[in-house]
Amino acid sequence: MRSPFARLALVALFVVLAVQLGVLLRAGLSHRPPGHRARRAPDADDGDDSSAGSLDVQRVEPGATLSFRTYLDTVLPPASNGTSVGQLWLTAASSHTLSTWTPILAERVARLNAKRTDLDRIRLVVLCADAQCIDECRLHEDWWCHGGLARTRPRRRDSLTWLQVNGESPLLSAELRIVDSLESGRDVLFIQPGAMVLGDPLPEIVGASQQADLVVLGKSSGAVSGEISSSFIWTRSTPFTIDLWRKMLDESARSTASLDTLLNAGLQRPAIVDQSDPSAVDNRLYQEYMARTQGHLVSDVMYADPPKLLILPDMVGTRSDLKQLLKLAITAAKLLNRTLEPPATATFLDVLDKKGDPLILPVYAAFPLPYLARALDFSLVEPGYTARAYAHLSSQHPSPEPLAVDVEPSQLDSAASSYLTLATLSSPYPLDLTACTSLYDLVRRLSLLAMQQEPVVRLARATDHLHRATAADGESWREWDAKETFPRGTRLVQPCAKLGPKSGAGGTCETVCRMPASWIAPPHSDADGSAAAADDDEGDRVVREMRRRAGDEPWPALNDYLREGGFPVWT
């Protein structure tokens, strides 16, 4: 017969075990990898929010300190070489959407994963907004769920406003988890609740990601300012995209602005680089991001009066080939006072990506074009400028109309000039590069009176000529003698130093090829001013060093260059 104390101790032990078992069952995971404590893990630094009420889901796992970034290491662990295994997809959910829309998305992801290996499997993480969502999510063994959204709900905002239970609008706090994901070095695809995944969006995203670090697909109608309003938002982890998302979070904290500031600027197009006509009230973040990542500004003024252009349509070859091709294009553009339009991408046949294919990079991540333009003093526009200028002018002059008999001559000239510009933009004059025997010959052809009257000239068959041993009348442009033919300043034309898969963040050259922030716009505040001044010093220092290496040798005048090549000069 046990003593009363023994019986009391035994009862107490059972009570403790029952309480612990209840906690484990409530915080349990439906999918538990080795060493994973629980899926719900609020950040240690989330802070208290007394207004959270029933949405405070910290009680799901009392005392948990696992951050979302640590949680991602469990869901999507890094491989031995430091790269991420699989693809990270994020979406937001409430207890309502978890039982209506989320199962449809999860079923579609399961179908896509059936055709994938472990290295490229999709990991869909559901960001839950309430405790009931967590409770129901853990019932699905193949779902990954995280409850870190509720504790970041803004104060003085009722739950219905913050979380639209019809599932049509995602949570503002999802932006914070996107930043966490990007800061962990992972590329992330965010899917708006309610978006239907009918097929695999990755092929379209992969195609657009060759030209952009941020891809926005399927803008929803009736977007509400202050909320993420796109069906799919893919972001590559780079210092610039992380900075962009952080600034959007700051905007959200100060006002109702967030990603819609950019979406209203037209980012519903397949890739951010396709934007040409921002219409948002405040598109400063968009302007700065575009300039810092791609080295050009976006403004209607640029498209209203196109300069004389020299288009380099494609760049495919070895590093040496592409360097030579860009050097001849820069030389021709500078000597003929034309503005250079580079291609969107550069393909390096002698540098392979992770899959063993030739490396394709955005041209702004392959060559430091903004710095070259400043150091060598030539004009540069962004890839696709011609198409954007045509679209802008077409919207201003949709179709020719009969002119009045008493029209002023100045009006007649203006109208005729506008339609002529549209015609030349739609069909640039092709100059066959394979017919040129030397760089001197290329410059001579461009200097002919008939050619100088062409507003837009396109260097045709550059890639075709790449695979020819010799041209019809001389050497291939790859063998044009760089020492005797090219001006000395073109020695600065070099590919970015960090070419290769996953070089830096996202495989791009982050420190050399990008435009300093101070070259973009005047500072907006005292705080921004100090940073801009430091950035200006660094950017100008790089340009001064480039000019010093080039010897500060002046470029020859056009006629002097032609005489040097042995061609007659017509005066």
Image (cartoon, helix red, strand yellow):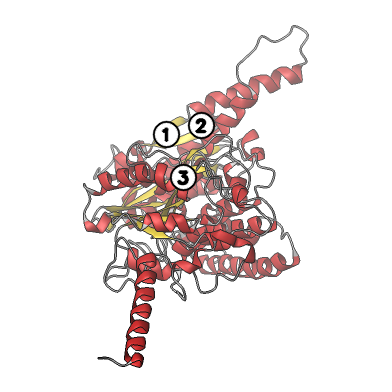
Q: Earlier in the sequence, mark 1 or mark 2?
A: 1
Question: Foreground mark, 1 or 3?
Answer: 3
Residue at screen point 39% across, 71% down: 23
Secondary structure under badge 2?
A: helix
Picture quadrant of residue 10:
bottom left
Residue at screen point 66% across, 9% down: 402
Disc 2: CA contacts within 10 A as few (<14), some (14-19) or many (>=20): some
- 384, above or below 326, in the image: above
Task: Describe residue 182's horizontal placement relative to residue 466 as left or right.
Answer: right
Q: Amino acid at mark 1?
A: Leu
Where does label 2 land, which residue? 451
| Residue 122 horizontal/vertical position (percent) | 31, 53
Picture quadrant of residue 366:
bottom left
Task: Describe residue 448's horizontal placement relative to residue 397 as left or right.
Answer: left
Disc 1: CA contacts within 10 A as few (<14), some (14-19) or many (>=20): some
Q: Are marks 1 and 2 in contact (CB under 8 Å)?
A: yes
Where does label 3 land, which residue? 193
Q: Nearer the viewer, residue 306 or 11?
A: 11
Quarter of the picture holding the N terminus: bottom left
Residue at screen point 57% across, 43% down: 263
Residue at screen point 49% across, 63% down: 148
Alpha carbons under labels 1 and 3: distance apart: 50 Å
Disc 3: CA contacts within 10 A as few (<14), some (14-19) or many (>=20): many
Quarter of the picture holding the C terminus: top right
Where does label 1 land, which residue? 431
Asked whether residue 257 appears in the rendered view, the answer is: yes
Alpha carbons under labels 1 and 2: distance apart: 9 Å
Secondary structure under badge 1?
A: strand
